[in-house]
Image (tube, rainbow, N blue to C red):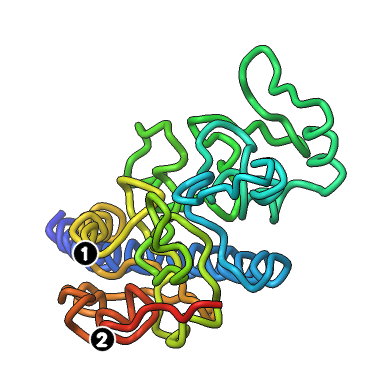
Amino acid sequence: MVEILVVVAILGILVAILVPSLGRAKQIAEAMVNTTNLKNIATATLAWAGDHGNKLPSPQYPGGEIVPGTMDPDDYFPDYWNLGESGLWIDGVVFGHMYLSEQARREDDKDGDYGDDGYASSGGYEVDESGTHLRGTLFENTQSVKADPEEQDWHKHSYAMNTNLQYDRRKEDSPEPWLTEKTLSNLLFMPNALLYIENKESNLIDFDDREAIIETMEERWEGSKVIAAFLDGHAERLKENQIPEADPNTDRESSRFWRGVDINRSASSE
């Protein structure tokens, strides 16, 4: 009996040692998958920009854009901007670029009808305010779903676009210039400039939302690292001290990270 108790005690100790290690290994594997997914989203975003005048999509349509008086809004904004109700990049622009076929988009435009339930249906995806179309796609952060299984808004299980990127000078008169398309050639520090990052509160972030990013890191990854993608297309996990907390208007490193330019430098006009 004593020998059995000793064996049981030893097994208990081994389990206590191994379980946390297995949990960490599983979390690392989860992080690798989600980091790869966000890298693919960043690559698709840059591909979209390449097809649209070397401009990043606006974080939200119509956002801060002013439609010239001589133009129809439908002709001014990208094809996907009115897909669904949110207007977010994550629904009508990058998601559409990655998951909706050109033919399906044209058919939706032709019908001009989102159905009795108010949803836009294309390519088998129903784009709605709860973001259910993001479930099971590259836009779903699986660790977020595990950390907060009660959350039914899949936008919050996804990623956020950095709205701090320096806008084009000709957009200065727009109501919300940060919510406009940005010309990539004006953003000189692409390897350092943030494009997407995890944020459980919103799909749009800026420097002032840094604390929400840290909270997301705590909730999803137990404070280890948060997943981010950059303007050169790469994605990586960042520690808290790798996310600049200084004012991007006065600190060079922070400005390059959040704005994509040096301090006190506006984007050059086109």
The amino acid type found where label 1 is placed reads Gly
Mark number displayed over residue 223? 1
Residue at 48 percent of width and 67 percent of height:
170
Q: In the shown orientation, is residue 223 left or right of residue 269?
A: left
The mark tally for this picture is: 2
- Label 2 crowding class (10 Å Cα cut-off): few <14, some 14-19, many 20+? many
The amino acid type found where label 2 is placed reads Glu
What is the x, y in percent for residue 217? 26, 60
Compared with residue 240, is residue 16 higher up or lower down, i.e. above or below?
A: above
Q: Secondary structure at mark 1?
A: loop
Q: Quadrant of residue 13?
A: bottom left
> 53 and 173: which one is in front?
173
**Which residue in the protein does label 2 denote?**
253
Mark number displayed over residue 177? none
Compared with residue 104, is residue 159 higher up or lower down, i.e. above or below?
A: below
Compared with residue 149, is residue 174 higher up or lower down, i.e. above or below?
A: below
Residue at 83 percent of width and 49 percent of height:
102
What is the x, y in percent for residue 47? 68, 70
The single residue placed furthest to the front in the displayed view is 70
**Considering only order in the chain, which callout, 2 or 1, is on the residue closer to the N terminus?**
1
Residue at 44 percent of width and 71 percent of height:
169
Q: Secondary structure at mark 2?
A: helix
The single residue placed furthest to the left in the displayed view is 2
Q: In the shown orientation, is residue 99 left or right of residue 198?
A: right
Compared with residue 267, is residue 49 higher up or lower down, i.e. above or below?
A: above
